[in-house]
Image (cartoon, helix red, strand yellow):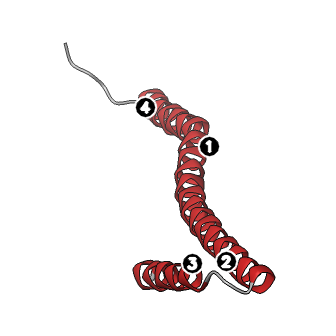
Amino acid sequence: MILTITWELILAIAGGIVVLINAIKAIGNFISPVTDIKKKLSKHDELLGNDNKRLTSIEQTNKMICKSLVALLDHEITGNGIEKLKTTKTEMQNYLIEKN
């Protein structure tokens, strides 16, 4: 069987190629938002993790500050509690050294 190349055949092949290219673009446009959302979600997870670490650190610092204030108040009220102040000072120093 001999295949003769005619204008109709060339146009049919070119039309098929255009249809395939458009189909690939349509699939790409359909998949693109999904991949974009996955990238954004991954970035948001990273940022939330960083924020969680920071908030945890702030909470620990606030606890240490409150503990120190209670020791100072106790000392001011009773005029005593120097050992408690020394212990709290040591804890605060250790906390600051470990934090940084």
First in sequence: mark 4 vs mark 2: 4
Horizontal arrangement in the rendering, residue 97 relative to residue 88 (left or right): left
Give the residue furthest to the left.
Answer: 1
Image position, residue 24 (x, y; %): 49, 37
Which quadrant, please, contains the N terminus? top left
Cβ–Cβ under 8 Å for marks 4 and 2: no
Q: Nearer the viewer, mark 4 or mark 3?
A: 3
Q: CA distance from mark 1 to mark 4?
A: 31 Å
Name the N-terminal-most of marks 4 and 3. Answer: 4
Kindly identify which residue carries mark 1: 33
Q: Choose between 29 and 23: the one closer to the eye.
A: 29
Residue drawn at (55%, 57%) of the image = 43
Q: Amino acid at mark 2?
A: Ala
Q: Are marks 4 and 3 in contact (CB under 8 Å)?
A: no
Query: Quick one: label 3 or label 2, which is nearer the N terminus?
Result: 2
Q: Which residue is mark 3?
A: 84
Q: What number is the disc on residue 71?
A: 2
Residue depth check, mark 2 versus mark 1: number of the one nearer the observer: 2
Mark 4 belongs to which amino acid? Ile
- List the residue tagged with mark 4: 13
Circle 4: element type: helix
Circle 3 or circle 1, nearest the eye: 3
Against 79, is 41 above or below?
Answer: above
Q: Position of residue 100 (x, y in %)?
A: 44, 84
Q: Nearer the viewer, mark 4 or mark 2?
A: 2
Q: Give the alpha-carbon distance from disc 3 to disc 2, as whole Å.
A: 6 Å
Q: Going from the N terminus, do you reach mark 2 or mark 1 first?
A: 1
| Left or right: 16 as drawn, with respect to 44 | left
Relative vertical location of residue 54 with respect to residue 4 in this rendering, above or below: below
Confirm or deny contact between disc 3 and disc 2 (CB under 8 A): yes
Q: Position of residue 57 (x, y in %)?
A: 57, 69
Can you name the residue that lies furthest to the right here? 77
